[in-house]
Amino acid sequence: MGERKLFGTDGIRGRANIYPMTCEVAMTLGRAVTSHFQKFRRNKQPLIIVGKDTRLSCYMLEMAFASGVCSQGGQVILTGPLPTPAIAFITTSMRADAGVMISASHNSYDDNGIKIFDAFGYKLPDEVELELEKMVLDPSLMNVRTGPFLGNAKRFKEEVFGRYVVRCKSAFPSKYDLSGMRIVLDCANGAGYRVAPMMFTELGAEVLSLGVHPNGKNINEDCGSLHPEEACQSVHKYRADLGICLDGDGDRLVIIDENGQVVDGDKLIAISAKLLLDQGKIKKGDIIAGTVMSNLGLEVYLNGLGLGLHRTKVGDRYIMEYMRESGVVLGGEPSGHLIFAEHSTTGDGSLAALKIIECMKYYNKSISELMKDVALFPQVLKNAVVQKKVPLETVGPVQEVLKKAGDQLGDKGRVLIRYSGTEPLARVMVEGENSELVEDLCEELVQVVSKELA
């Protein structure tokens, strides 16, 4: 497989209006996506759903991408701000050929990105992304459309909002409702700012909303899953049953317990697995999907339930690929991406929150009580700024300190170094039983990686 020049871990991402996140690239990508899916339409116009979050730059990129689709003979439906998982669902619900989400997720407002889903709501595999890249980098590979073969665009809003809300609510058992519950909901001034409060209110909760006044520049700014501090204070102040913090595009979440404490994403995976086991939806011997970043404590807990853990590369699309191949029904990341295969084809923060509330209802316990049995190992994650991304196995000093760390941790810990897919960073993760040792080893690794890859 060739080297990827545009697509990273999760679509294309970068500083808005700077290559590759320019209108020119977005328009050419719109042409490429349409050209690719025309092959399956037999002369009919491909239908492409285009959604976005609340960034200022979404206006220009949305119009540019839609123009590319129309110029290549496709039809576009523009949804306006909607969470990433909503676009995946709407794509299948409206029998479209592809869905496109314009968002940089948890990044600051001056970044943006483009994610693409196929007709079944799944993120595109690497080989399709490489095919799209070739067409973007060499537009002569695409036929030019003229006259009656050009496409058109329409804007739908309320229609698609309603479909997504109903779909998420259907994942919550009808024997339960949220009446009597007080929920602090922080939407990060992002894509979920309208639909998420609507969803939890319709189920009967008293919703105290934060991060629901986007202005194009305040997405993820001191709010949402990256900055849950205000939500934690609000849960404590208003004696809420729990807090829910979404990220900018609504595909992951942070849960806050009734005491105002943030709950680790691996713990959410753990209690979700126990629920599925006790409900008979999975059985002993089954596998839960995680990533190389999943905590050893999660693996120990799952093993205690008679379940296994499979680790994939970082990124919910790699988790979903493994789940599809193996038939696994639950997967997730420590960052709060949770995928319930029965209900979704990608991470969905609002749906995951409803499943966590289902755990509360099923066991008749608070969030803090549910988490007591899940003990995670101390884990430290730090970033090392790098100027080059060479294979780590070729860097002698890095390998030496990795061996030293592995020897000291033994089989009671792990060390992982990986490059960021979107930033000039190396992620260094160390976990083990001794928190002081873990901290020291992580800091030493960061120093060596930074020096050797400067």
Image (cartoon, rainbow, N blue to C red):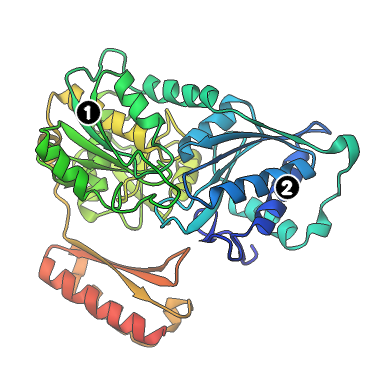
The one of 306 and 368 positioned closer to us in this rendering: 368
Residue at which label 2 appears: 68
Sequence-first tag of 2 and 1: 2
The one of 46 and 14 positioned closer to us in this rendering: 14
Residue shown at the point (15%, 25%) measured from the top left: 363
Instruction: Tell me the tag on residue 359.
Output: 1
Instruction: Tell me the tag on residue 141.
Output: none
CA–CA distance in space, label 2 to label 1: 45 Å
Check the picture and name the quadrant holding the N terminus.
Answer: bottom right
- Amino acid type shown at disc 2: Gly
Residue 242, how many percent across, how many down?
18, 34
Kind of element beneath mark 2: helix
Query: Is residue 306 visible from the viewing direction of this image?
Result: no
Callout 1 crowding tier (Cα within 10 Å): few <14, some 14–19, many ≥20: many
Residue shown at the point (21%, 43%) measured from the top left: 231
Q: Does 448 appear above or below 301?
A: below
- Amino acid type shown at disc 1: Cys
Residue shown at the point (24%, 48%) measured from the top left: 228
The one of 230 and 170 positioned closer to us in this rendering: 230
